[in-house]
Image (cartoon, rainbow, N blue to C red):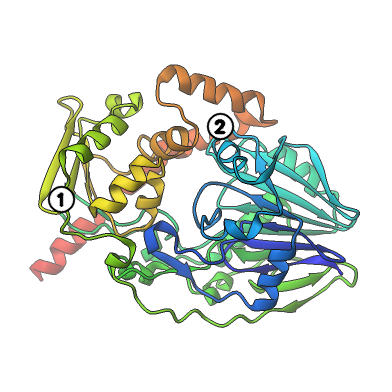
Amino acid sequence: MLGFETIGNATLTIFDDKPVLTTDPWLDGKPYFGSWTHAYKIPNHQKDNILKSDYIWLSHGHPDHIDPDSLKYFKDKTLLIADHYGDRIYNELKKEFKCIKLKSNSWFKVSKNVRIKSFSDWNQDSCLLVEVGKKDIILNLNDGSALGWSKEIKKIISMYKNRFLLKLINWGDADMINFYNHHNEFILPLAAEKKSCGLSYAYYMKKWNCNYAIPFSSMHKYIREDSISMNKFVTPLKEHYTGFKANNCQILPAFINWDTTNQSFSEINPDKNDESIKPSQDFSDNWNDDLDNSDKKIIENYFRKFEHIKDKFGFICFKVGGSEFNLKYSNKKEGIEFSCPRNSLIFSISNNIFDDVLIGNFMKVKLIDVPSLYPDFTPYVTKYGDNGGVYSKTELKKYFDYYKFNSANYWLDYLKIKTEDIIRPKIEKYRSLYYFARNVKRKLT
């Protein structure tokens, strides 16, 4: 068979008579400190295909894409890693696995009829083009946006008959959404509006010149007792098709087997995952555990490295158990308060994976005179710092210079994202005021 199948959360398996390539195989683990699990089970046949693949491509560091508990299955495989600044993923994995670092925008031959191009970007994401035969091309964007490569990728895609888009599209829960305002009132996320996913599919299919889309990178649910309330913001699979209208385009089922030779597909129907809710203690998190002095030193040493945070925030506060620990930078009124169990907080900081405790959405984040964690906190801490290994202004310049020279369309996409960074916090600021006023009105009436 020549073709591909989709399964799990963001897993794509390519066939050329046999399985030759699999992307982001999250099989066993419970990412984000046990907060996430699969929405659908992975059937044994599809799991077997994943395990037989010659190559494993890993897009980025989030544990629903690089699952530490699944890596044990791939000791005899070749891992394909994007060429990021700092090479954190490549350097860590090459200690135990055979790894190849893929140069961006360069074809890599996987088999007789399959070749791929990987593209890294400054958000520490990477995307993949997969050519299957001469007619099919797959754009696997997973969680990313192919920053710095949009024009180049669209030029390549235009040469193929069947152009498949695989991209994170949902209501918006696959990010940090457990926010509160300074009055300690929950801030409804954009996901609460449950906007039509179909409109987003139509937009992105037009943007990337794709005639097929497959729901992707969105197949999770919350399972920890302290995060299950976020399940009301998780997008049901049927909602991916709501409102979709586009000429000569189609959204296919989420789990399919596509036959390139016959230009047809069959649907895979995995069972829903009915796993029971887990207490936080199952993942070594006890909300009553306090910080000790060594913990406070770990927190302080970590956050004081970020020069940008010092410039933009007056303080960061940590409420853990019955203790409170404050880092003061200046007299600025802008600050952030994190309420989190000790174990996951200290583990995430000690291992430079602070994004994991954010996206787990059991940690409560209070925004004090700031509209959002974007653009001044999250990318500088979790992307440029944890993944890129850069903390100072001098290091940041080298970091962005690397992507400037390593991207075909750097300035085109950089200016777009900078504009969004300016607009997005303003929108979120006014949304917060709106929901606050609405809640006050409800209480009064």
Residue at left 65%, top 43%?
81
- The picture places residue 242, in percent across and down from the top left corner, at 55, 73
Which dot, 1 or 2, sits closer to the camera? 1
Q: Quadrant of residue 164?
A: bottom right
SS at mark 2 in the image:
helix
Q: Residue at x 26, y 57 (%)?
A: 187
Q: Nearer the viewer, residue 440 or 33?
A: 33
For badge 2, the amino acid type reads Tyr
Can residue 21 be seen by looking at this rendering?
yes
Q: Which residue is mark 1?
A: 290
**Residue 320 x %, y %:** 17, 50
Q: Quadrant of the N terminus?
A: bottom right
Tell me if label 1 and label 2 are in contact, CB under 8 Å: no
Whether residue 431 is visible here, answered yes or no, is no
Question: Does residue 315 appear left or right of residue 17 in this picture?
Answer: left
Binning the other alpha carbons within 10 Å of mark 2 as few (below 14), some (14 to 19) or many (20 upward) gives: some
Q: CA distance from mark 1 to mark 2?
A: 42 Å
- Residue 401 at x, y = what percent? 57, 21
Which residue is the site of mark 2?
414
Q: Position of residue 411 (x, y in %)?
A: 61, 28
| In-image side of 131 versus 336 (left or right) | right
Above or below: residue 14 compared with residue 410: below
Residue at horizontal 47%, vertical 23%? 396
Q: Amino acid at mark 1?
A: Asp
Q: Determine which quarter of the picture holds residue 257.
A: bottom right
Front residue of 264/28: it is 28
Above or below residue 302? Residue 216 is: below
